[in-house]
Amino acid sequence: MDNRSIGVFDSGLGGLTAVKEIMRRFPNENIVYFGDTSRVPYGTRSKETILKYTHSDIRFLLSCDVKMIVIACGTASSAALPEIKTEFDVPIYGVVDSGAYEAARVTKNNRIGIIGTPATIKSGAYNKYIAGYNPDAETFEKACPLFVPLVENGHFNTPVTKLVIDEYLADIKKAGVDTLIMGCTHYPLLKEAIAEYMGDDVTLVSPGEEVAKFLEKKLNSENSHSEEKDKDQYRYYVSDCIESFEELGGIFLETKINGKVNRIDIEKY
Ligand code: DGL
């Protein structure tokens, strides 16, 4: 038993896709979430900058006495995690391995689409894991940099979102994939629109949700489940404006988070 919180971070709203699933699966776990909203987006930045941001995000979460850290960000998981994994004393898990595992498992025609930020696609991380789990799978990738600002501005399923989806996903659709990894944790907030475009025959994989399944195994095998909810079971921190995070985060989580979000100065970490 370990009642300390699970620390989760992303550049903004995207990591809430992991948080929602962690909440659903483990009602007793305490969660500290950090959305680095003053520095979003991560996915168009250099590896050095992503590494620097990831370090400070982890240092902040460690200051909250967490038992483990989930990098609920495809970009930081693929560009930074391999290098920083052993630098800290707590276990750190990313979303790429779990997302790739699920896609390799569910595909029937071995044609898998991968969409993500430019940094994630450039890293080739999803490809690497998929090749390990299913060497017969062929992958079709596309960087979709406009999706993150659409999400951060609440365009979950609007005409402009549909237009951008057509622009980015046309080739992947043509390639006949039966599985699509939404390789940036922001993208599941566009799931309805992406599913409409790709059609019923395509399975959409959300790595944020998949990492929660993986945590189940970890918490069980290490017997580190929480048995006691804190008074503030879910704490949210951002590095910029609270209001839009409260509003959009609340819509996505389907619960009001007003008054539970605090602003920190991430430059101090
Ligand atoms: N949600 C993140 C990801 O999974 C970050 C997107 C961004 O900040 O560009 O890649």
Image (cartoon, rainbow, N blue to C red):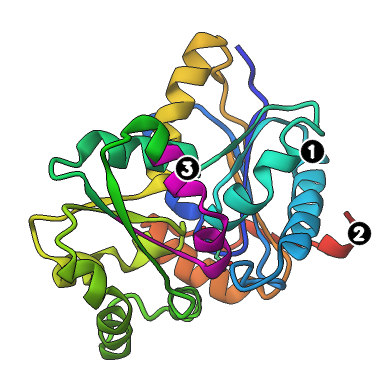
Give the image quadrant in which the ligand numbered 1 is located: bottom right
Q: Nearer the viewer, mark 2 or mark 3?
A: 3
* Residue 179 spot, x, y in % from top left: 22, 51
Hey, which quadrant is residue 183 in on the image? bottom left
Q: Main secondary structure of the magenta part?
A: helix
Hey, which quadrant is residue 110 in on the image? top left
> For this view, does 203 lie left or right of residue 58?
left
| Residue with the mark numbered 3 | 128
Residue 62, numbered circle? 1
Query: Callout 1: few (<14), some (14-19), or many (20+) C-alpha neighbours within 10 Å?
Result: some
Name the amino acid type tagged 1.
Leu
Secondary structure of residue under mark 1 = helix
- Is 27 drawn above or below residue 125 in the view shown? above
Q: Earlier in the sequence, mark 3 or mark 1?
A: 1
* Residue 141 spot, x, y in % from top left: 37, 63
Name the amino acid type tagged 3.
Lys
Q: How many marks?
A: 3
| Residue with the mark numbered 2 | 268
What residue appears at the point 73 percent right and 53 percent down from the top-left corner?
54
Q: Nearer the viewer, residue 216 or 88?
A: 88
- Is 45 drawn above or below residue 232 in the view shown? below
Q: Is residue 84 magenta?
A: no
- Is 86 drawn above or below residue 268 in the view shown? above
Name the amino acid type tagged 2.
Lys
Secondary structure of residue under mark 2 = helix
> For this view, does 35 lie left or right of residue 185?
right
Question: Rounded to the nearest whole Å, what is the CA distance between mark 3 and mark 1?
Answer: 29 Å
Q: Which residues are magenta?
A: 113-130
